Amino acid sequence: MSQATAEATLPFEEALAAYDPVLGLEVHVELGTNTKMFCGCATAFGAEPNSQVCPVCLGLPGALPVVNEKGVESAIRIGLALNCEIASWCRFARKNYFYPDMPKNFQTSQYDEPIAFNGHLDVELADGSTYRVEIERAHMEEDTGKSLHVGGSTGRIHGATHSLVDYNRAGIPLIEIVTKPMTGAGERAPEIAKAYVATLRDLLKALAVSDVKMEQGSMRCDVNLSLMPKDSTTFGIRSETKNVNSLRSVERAVRYEIGRHAAILSSGGKVTQETRHWHEDTGITTAGREKSDAEDYRYFPEPDLVPVAPSTEMVEALRATLPEPPAARRKRLQSAWGYSDLEMRDVVNAGLVDLIDETVTAGATPAGARKWWSGEIARRANDAGSDVPTYAASLAVTPAHVVELESLVTGGRLNDAMARQVWDGVLAGEGTPTAVADARGLELVQDTGALQAAVDKVIAANPDVAQKVRDGKVQAAGALIGQVMKEMKGQADAAAARQLILDTLVG
């Protein structure tokens, strides 16, 4: 557990009564290229430490970089998807500062000449309203290595006995997307921050430029926040909470920093311009280092790289590759599937849009696809501590399985109880739904004589219930249906059993 100590905070509502939050988000996205931004080293996640390095990404003397063409194309596609202007000419720069995980002692980035600028992203909030986030810039740069601080209790450098550095990540292509300051959000600032990062993640995933796995660090958010008094238009001093790596934590970090800033300001103190560390376990931030201004980084143009000058033809060709925006796609699919707003929201929140789309395309009904993916399979995934897409992929459960199972139910071979048994077999690797049903002998009894015999037996054994049905209390037939299903060992058609019961007792 973290040993970090929380600072004083003002209650959220009290803070917002006196101050207006000003929010800015910087999202770093690792591109899914096969090689690094300026060399040919592999980018696979989880490799042995320092096994994917070369003289270029280690910053050795005399090693010269070469720009990754795919990285530039991905940057342009991201800029276009964010409604940005694309620079016809831009350069890389050296951002100079020392840190052990940056072997060159500078980061190759872009400063005053980003590849994309002046864009926007419309974000849909929980109540259906839309907030437009203005995008300042999206620029190309390289990631740093990764430090591991050993011997302390917090995993941070303070208190550690020694540090290890893995340079596999050094040089991986990054796009940094920077918003303009967001004002007027008020109490919805935490919600807007979370919704923006979620919307951006969906967009980047649709573009197929990154796996956007926040838990692995391939998408990270820095939360910049300041407060200004209600009667002021001058921004306050900001803090920057670094490397927040989940949607929930983005929301929590904004809320915490609003309370912390308000407590300092209301007591007559002054906020320090600094970076902050986010602590997932306690939900607080702690001081990192005082934040440098741009001039402190001594930016200057990178002399070893030629300018990037995408032609109009190139930009338009890349524009033609953009997919349908995720929000527009969801609205189209919801209309086609006939889902209510609540049903669609549940599908989206569970990450099931793609799976249901594939399942419907493969031949399932929209209702059947949602029923099995968000019902039975989701329950099992939750029991396994996983999300549905990950769970399904790990067990090789496919949309084709759902289509086949639905056809077995609608075709009259299985009822829902049997179908759940079939899922047990499919998830255990016993084969397709039909193969499992065959192997386990699962099939509804089609012999009406056998079903009538079971109905007669159950009616005879439950005369009081049977009399209620005769007296017009049709709902009482449910208890008899359950007994018939038990008598038939679950292999009866419940609808057929109900009809036979009513025919027998009511006529």
Image (cartoon, grey):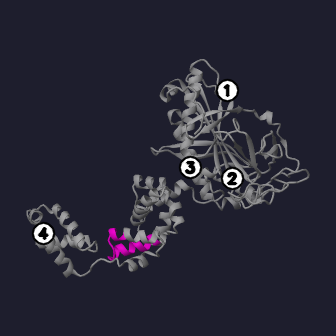
Magenta region includes residue 412: yes
Q: Foreground: 136 or 383?
A: 383
Pinpoint residue 315: horizontal percent, then vertical percent.
Answer: 72, 57
Q: N-terminal of the two: label 3 or label 2?
A: 2
- Alpha carbon of mark 2 to alpha carbon of mark 1: how far? 30 Å
Residue on which disc 4 sits: 461
For the point 22% across and 66% down, the residue is: 482
The three-letter code of the residue at mark 3 reads: Thr
The three-letter code of the residue at mark 2 reads: Glu
Closer to viewer: mark 4 or mark 1: 4
The three-letter code of the residue at mark 1 reads: Thr
Q: Which residues are magenta?
A: 401-419
Residue on which disc 2 sits: 30
- Alpha carbon of mark 2 to alpha carbon of mark 4: how far? 68 Å
Magenta region includes residue 26: no
| For the residues bearing labels 2 and 1, Cβ distance under 8 angstroms | no
Pinpoint residue 255: horizontal percent, then vertical percent.
Answer: 54, 34
Closer to viewer: mark 3 or mark 1: 1
